[in-house]
Amino acid sequence: MSPTDARPVLLVLASTYPRWKDDHEPGFVHELAKRLTGRFRVLALVPHSLGACEREVLEGVEVVRYRYAPARWETLVNDGGIVANLRRARWKLLLVPGFALIQMWQAWRIVRQEGVDVIHAHWLIPQGLIAALVQRVAGNKVPFVVTSHGADLHALHGRVLDRLKRFVADRAAAVTVVSGAMRSKLLALGVSHGEVSVLPMGVDMRERFRLDVSVQRSSRELLFVGRLVEKKGLRHLLEAMPQVLRRIPDARLTIAGFGPEEAALKALCDRLGLGHVVRFLGAVPQADLPALYRRAALFVAPFIRARSGDEEGLGLVLVEAISCGCPLLVGDVPAVADVLGVDFGGMVVNPRDTENLAARIIDVLVHPEAAQTRAGHLRETVGTRFDWSAVSAQYSDLLAKVI
């Protein structure tokens, strides 16, 4: 640290983090971290992945990527997330102890060497638990804020795990969740009402995801954006497509995303005879997503609750679509109320009822003017409350208050 740098030191602990600039992996932790560098000296301690630098300064954030296995085995986090990767390959459970213990040791070392003033742990488990344990052994009792994003709360459950979540929340200076539905679930575990606040992650609504009236919207293109994992519900959208095509033969579906279910979903397309109407784009950089939202006739986010109990924590893809003026149809999971509010029930559907899902899609494609009017009203309602400028200011104030 430079002797002239008077900024307090913030240590960010996370699992999911970009491996390099413009990586297709979810980048919301970094997007927040880089916006805090004006007020804090930000160090991010995250797992290493093949091809990534072990140390670098990424858009003002000092990133330390710790090694937790031989390079070819460091596959616990990327391409779907920890929970999905563990379900797909049970042997990866062997990676978990090293993953957590080495991050804890590295965090303790950074706290001692860098004079850390506050820790922001993303996910209750394992990062929140790591922050709580580091606090007990660091000597200076560095305070920490923990943020739950969804999978840690919904998919990781059971008596022991629930006790660990309460242990983390009890020792945190502040606990945040990204939706009101998640707050209710965390409170149901016995966490104090006063300790949990709702602070979402953000979207660049001012510069990147914005309306462009010069772009002509398609009349037949459906769009899906997201990881190819069970809770995103893409299987049900594919199963609804044959019914859509019987009424609207020129309908098309564009899929932007990657993940562990990709092969199975492509095989389902083949079985349903959808190869000529469904296009898998794979991983799409954030910079290229606005063009997809501006062109699509309808954005379909068929969220469901997965068999593991995991479900969408908030669904920032909805905010991206709304900000670009795209009509949408959303799976009926509790968290979407934070985005849609209480007056937009007409945009919510049960994706497992594929007949009704198809009928709702057809209705939008047949009546595009009404769908576009609803999209405009929703865009006005959402406003800029999810923009990164507003979100990062709230987190910045919270972290400063904790210090």
Image (cartoon, rainbow, N blue to C red):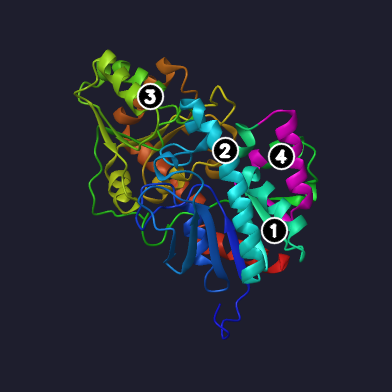
Are there few (<14), some (14-19), or many (20+) residues within 10 Å of tag 4? many
Are there few (<14), some (14-19), or many (20+) residues within 10 Å of tag 2? some
Tell me the residue that label 2 is attached to. Answer: 96
Secondary structure beneath dot 4 equals helix
Q: CA distance from mark 4 to mark 3?
A: 30 Å
Give residue 189's position: percent from left, percent from top: 76, 36
Q: CA distance from mark 2 to mark 3?
A: 33 Å
Tell me the residue that label 1 is attached to. Answer: 144
Secondary structure beneath dot 2 equals helix
Q: CA distance from mark 1 to mark 2?
A: 23 Å
Tell me the residue that label 3 is attached to. Answer: 237
Asked if labels 2 and 1 touch by Cβ distance under 8 angstroms, the answer is no
Choose mark 4 or mark 1, whichever is in front.
1
Give residue 100's position: percent from left, percent from top: 60, 45
Choose mark 1 or mark 3, whichever is in front.
1
Q: Mark 2 belongs to which amino acid?
A: Val
Give residue 382's position: percent from left, percent from top: 50, 50
Give residue 29's position: percent from left, percent from top: 51, 54
Choose mark 1 or mark 2, whichever is in front.
2
Image quarter where the C terminus lies is bottom right
Q: CA distance from mark 2 to mark 4?
A: 24 Å
